[in-house]
Amino acid sequence: MSINLEVNVGGLVMKNPVTVGSGTFAYGQEYNSYFDVSRLGAVTTKSLSLKPRAGNKPPRLVETPAGMLNAIGLQNVGIEAYLRDKAPWLREHNCTIIGNIYGYSPEEYAELARRLEAEGAADAIEANLSCPNVHDARTARGCTLVAQDPEQVQRYTEAIRAATKLPLFIKLSPNVIDIAESALAAEAAGADGLSLINTLLGIGINPETRRPILSNIVGGLSGPAIRPVAVKLVWDAARAVKIPIIGMGGICNANDALQFILAGATAVAVGCYTFRKPDAAMDVVNGMEDYCRRHGVEKITDLIGAMEMQ
Amino acid sequence: MPYILDCEITSHQEVAPGHYRLVAHAPEIAAAAAAGQFCMLEVQEGFYPFLRRPMCFERIYPDSVSILYKIEGEGTRLLSRFTAGQSINIQGPLGKPFPLNGAYQRHIMVAGGIGIAPFPALAEAIIAQLGKTPEVIIAARNEDLLLCEDIFQQMGCKIHLATDDGSVGKKAFASEVLDALEPSKDSIVYCCGPMPMMKATHAVCQQRKIPCLASLEAEMACGDGVCLGCVVEANVEIEAERMVRVCCDGPVFDSTTIHWESY
């Protein structure tokens, strides 16, 4: 029996539904020594900004039960170096590219999307409206992330939408009361898909020193610890919008990934588990195929939102 | 290219209070490894600890590698429970090795505590590849925690001991012992240990205008340059290069690269 794993995420055709979480795969090439990264449905880049960013001061990460808390602060090479040094490799190796972007204003996001499209350096855009690690936690309070305010989500999405014809995905934050509000705002503004979830906000404190473990104080929690939260938010969002969802949060194997798909995601991303097992995303692809074979599923799209409720 | 392999542990022993030496049969990794590089160990199968543990190679044998480590937290505590005959998943070799430069006559290794770990392999490499016998300064809190003295003795290295409590050797900091050795233009220094100790060693080398290579340690998620969690601040103005990754830009750095004032 031949299994069809191909999915179409808002215009982006992926040969299988598996990509990687932005920031857990650098620019793709780094993991090619472990497996052929072009076999993934797509490679999602580290968040790219207009100017290179040094990111936060260390310490930037701390391990937590079944996960990790990080405050990298979007350290990245910047769009110019990406276009010059990173994108050509991805193209030469026939990778499908989701270009993740981060800016300080709608105009910056729009400019980044425009550059990626003009240079042919991405097949889809993922706008990170939800990075928790670029604000000063000492003073920030309330809606510090764009993704926490549906009006802002709409305004940013409209600006990026106007700048590109590429499939546009908006990456949303789980740190909200109702994910449906930001999901609907992105959809109304013309997004072709949603990526969720970004990390959950958290703090670690060292009782011996009474100081925060991360220099940024606040960090983003990821890993298997957050998976049930992520599956639930994907389920919520999928019922609220018609556009497809890339689900992520603590995926380590095919069973984890299938939970997202059954909850309504069209594709999935493997995040920080890649740090432990560099070819984890490929395991997910292979495991999905096995699952389909075992269950007589001919095409993976039959499983989208197929959770059975009595 | 790094390997990820299940390797059989051939011996695992406590060598000092809270300090262990693990030897694993890993022919591919050993063949690819060089002194100063490290590997990532999976300390258990489940999700806590979630991440691998970075450990430098203490010795690199034809078909195996040894790891010398100190119990610091949950990961190393679990690691210490592995027994000979069990298998452990090792990813490596990773990072940049110590560069070897035969132009220097005097090679001095300065180690603080568990910072001794990369130096047996380095001493072997210097002897084998450069035909020179390095000196080593071994500094520790007390006599019980001095590691690897026997190994360096067997290699014929000149050994200088220092302890914080004066229980053996000089009651001095490693950097002070280095200064007293009066290293000059024909010398190169390699250091590994706590940041303040390396900072002081760097200062001595700067004053004496001699090169110093520092092997750094950091918590890291991936070991491959991807997570950007292990960075330290560097001495450059270029925004994109202000942080260097211990895992793949290092772990061995020319000490002038590091912005020691931050530490």
Image (cartoon, grey):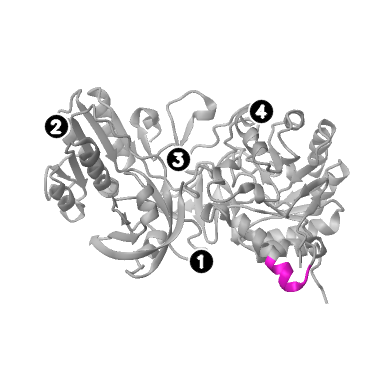
Residue at x 38% of width, y 30% of height: B261
Residue B116 on image: x %, y %: 26, 47
Residue B248 marker: 3
Q: Which residues are magenta?
A: A290-297
Q: Is residue B197 visible?
A: no
Q: Amino acid at mark 3?
A: Cys
Asked if marks 2 and 4 fall on the same chain, the answer is no
Q: Amino acid at mark 2?
A: Leu
Asked if marks 1 and 4 fall on the same chain, the answer is no
- What's the CA distance linking mark 1 and mark 4? 40 Å
Q: Secondary structure at mark 4?
A: loop
Residue at x 45% of width, y 40% of height: B248
Q: Left of A133 or right of it: where is B7?
A: left
Residue B183 on image: x %, y %: 17, 28
Residue B229 on image: x %, y %: 50, 44
Residue A50 marker: 4
Q: Left of A277 or right of it: where is B171?
A: left
Which residue is denoted by mark 2 in the rendering? B181
Q: Left of B25 or right of it: where is B147?
A: left
Q: Residues within 10 Å of mark 2 (few under 14, many from 20)?
A: few
Q: Nearer the viewer, residue B122 or A193?
A: B122
Asked if marks 4 and 3 fall on the same chain, the answer is no
